[in-house]
Amino acid sequence: MAAFYVRSGQRMNWRNFFSELQRRNVYRLAVTYTVVSWLLIQIATQVFPFFEIPAWAVRVVILLLILGFPVALILAWAFELTPEGIKRTEDVPPHASIRHHTGRKLLAFAAVVAAIAVGMFLIQFARRTTRAKDDPVAASAPVPFIPDKSIAVLPFRNLSAEEENVFFTDGIQDEILANLSKIADLKVISRSSVMVYKAGGPRDVREIGRELGVAHLLEGSVQRTKDRVKVTAQLIDARNDSHQWAEQYDREIKDVFAIQSEIAQAIAAQLQAKLSPTEKAAIQRSTRDVEAFDLYLRAKELINSFQDTPNRKETLLRAVRLLDEAISRDPNFALAYCWIATAHDNLHWFGLDHTPTRLAQAQAAAQKALALAPDLGDAHLAQALVYYHGSRDYTQALEELAIARRTLPNSADLYFLGGVIARRQGRWQDALSNLEKAAELDPRNPRVLNALAVLYDFLRRYDDELATFDRAAAADPRRADYWQMMRAQVALEKGEIETARAFLSSLPADYDPDGQATWTRIHLALYENDPDSAAKILAASKKEEIIGAAGRIVPANFFEGVIARARRDWPKAAEVFAAARTKVEADLAKQPDDAILLATLGLIDAGLARKEEALREGRRAVELRPLAADALDGATVLSSLAMICAWVGDIDAAIEQLAFLANTPGGPPFGQLKYDPAWEAVRGDPRFAAMVNELQPRAKEKR
């Protein structure tokens, strides 16, 4: 120290100090230590996960390396490596020092280590680049925040000898999930998004955690004998595949309901979730009758999957019969009444039995559930569904949802229903918030993602709509053709004809759900001013009914008439429109207040040159479904009225309606106004041309 310090009271000689640092190889050691530390961190971050070493171990390595840095510098200052071993620096004569050779070795070692570290970094970078090329959507998507208190309950494995106990096994998993979802301090993924990860097959827990956006997974198995049940459950940290908790329950079959509650409470404790007294009370058995529980589980499965069955009506009716039998065994089974209400509502809403009697049955079941369990969130959710579908009473439905949310904080169905109601009311931001929350809780549910995409479409947010299609296709590759078809429809809306053709060309020739692909191909041909090809496409489909406005099924004769108008084949148009009119009138006799159907009749009458009837029907449709009461159907019938006015020659009225719709979510898109021959009558008007120009998607909206 005397070499670079002066006596007390005098200043330090900094030049000598830095020279001494260099002489003692402190600089070289600092460089070497830094490079070696970087390599060790690279190894830890890439190798530790492979051996299932917890993530905190990487943080420990980094912390130790940081703490070791000043220690290494002090040791380099105080000691020197000599041929005889390590000695204090002051004890080594200058002529015997080999510091210079040691320094060169340190630098050479640092260079080698740096090369290795750079190589590992480049390999990791190359892998990321390859993944980005293979999946550009996933690579460009922001990494979502995954809360610690988040969980998905995966399907349990059935270890019972009887295959019929699969329902029982799925039911236990579903009830545990339902109990956990009642805890507001947790994020719990909905059933429809977890059922794809079937038990018994290989599971990559890290990948599942990323796909579902959760930090934890619950796995398990169920073995049922005549009068006993054995349930095994284990909690896994999906971020590092480490097991956090496991328990086995071997009880009498009558105790299965207690097991479900105990597992839910144990998981809540493991995740340190706050459990309020109300939530603790909600995690209770729904019935004490095991046979009634079995019947209930079978019915739930039928209701959840009825859309995918050949006879949807019979599937729902069978579910009702099973639930009736369950209630005959346990008249106080409130949850069974909730699902009966849902089954009746589906029969009515989807037109499988659209009668006042069916609607009354749905209402009666919801009311009975509320009478049995006034605080049951599922009962209020069922009542909200009936209010929305049955009477379009949005206010009452939202009040019921607000009550249901108190005990169902993780219900994707609740947020979904809130979103579609807000969408009907034209509360677009509330609709977005609710549907995006539903998609967060149920990320693989095509119904939720489709509703979100429809909302983006109404708002003309095409980039967001296409990104939602990408999410949906990634979640369920089996439905990739459907989302490809939807991309073609969006391309037509944007006026991107070539893009639409490319998407449609990639579809299988026989892919045509409800005639939607036929509808899309017909419009592509019409937009290309090729009505002959449109006629061939319609004839090849051999369908009597095809999807039309607002997703409604309309007679194929209607589209024949539209194509004949584009050909200016007026006799043919009159012939096929007359046939379509007979069918639509018959349907209206059953549903006289169906605004979409009435607007379709107005278009048919406009095509038949029945001006007064067409205008009266179009205006009546708008009265039945005003925009203020229904922002979705309201925009559709207003668009139909504008087209009716154009077809009957009332150009000013058509332009007036279109000018309003141009600034209204759900109005006719740019591509339709620009290319569809249905608007030929107004296309020469300068006001129309200016309006179309304003609607054209700008560069920032193009993909």
Image: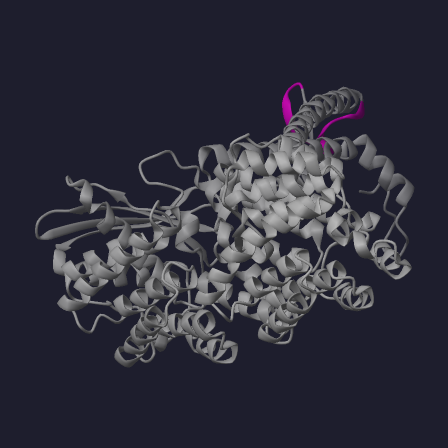
Left or right: 344, with 402 as reference point: left
Q: Which residues are magenta?
A: 83-94
- Is residue 9 visible in this depiction of the protein? yes
Query: Residue 299 in the image: x percent, y percent?
Result: 26, 56
In the image, residue 425 above or below residue 56:
below
Quadrant housing the N terminus: top right
Residue 42 lies, in percent from the top left, at 62, 33
Q: Nearer the viewer, residue 456 or 165?
A: 456
Q: Is residue 677 left or right of residue 14?
A: left
Residue 57 in view in this figure? no
Give x and y (percent) for residue 402: 47, 77
Q: Is residue 359 above or below residue 500?
A: below
In what quadrant of the picture does the C terminus appear?
top right
| Left or right side of 383 for 572 | right
Q: Position of residue 364 (x, y in %)?
A: 30, 76
Q: Nearer the viewer, residue 266 or 338?
A: 338
Q: Nearer the viewer, residue 553 or 158?
A: 553
Q: Is residue 84 magenta?
A: yes
Q: Is residue 270 placed above or below 428 in the rendered structure?
A: above
Residue 17 in which image quadrant:
top right
**Left or right, 582 with reference to 39:** left
| In magenta segment, residue 404 | no
As drawn, which residue projects farthest toward the left?
226
Please give the name of the residue rendered at 69% of the width and 27% of the height, measured from the top-left corner.
Answer: 122
The residue under the point 28% across, 77% down is 368
The picture quadrant where one finds residue 407 is bottom left
- Of 86 and 644, which appears nearest the observer? 644
Q: Residue furthest front?
A: 571
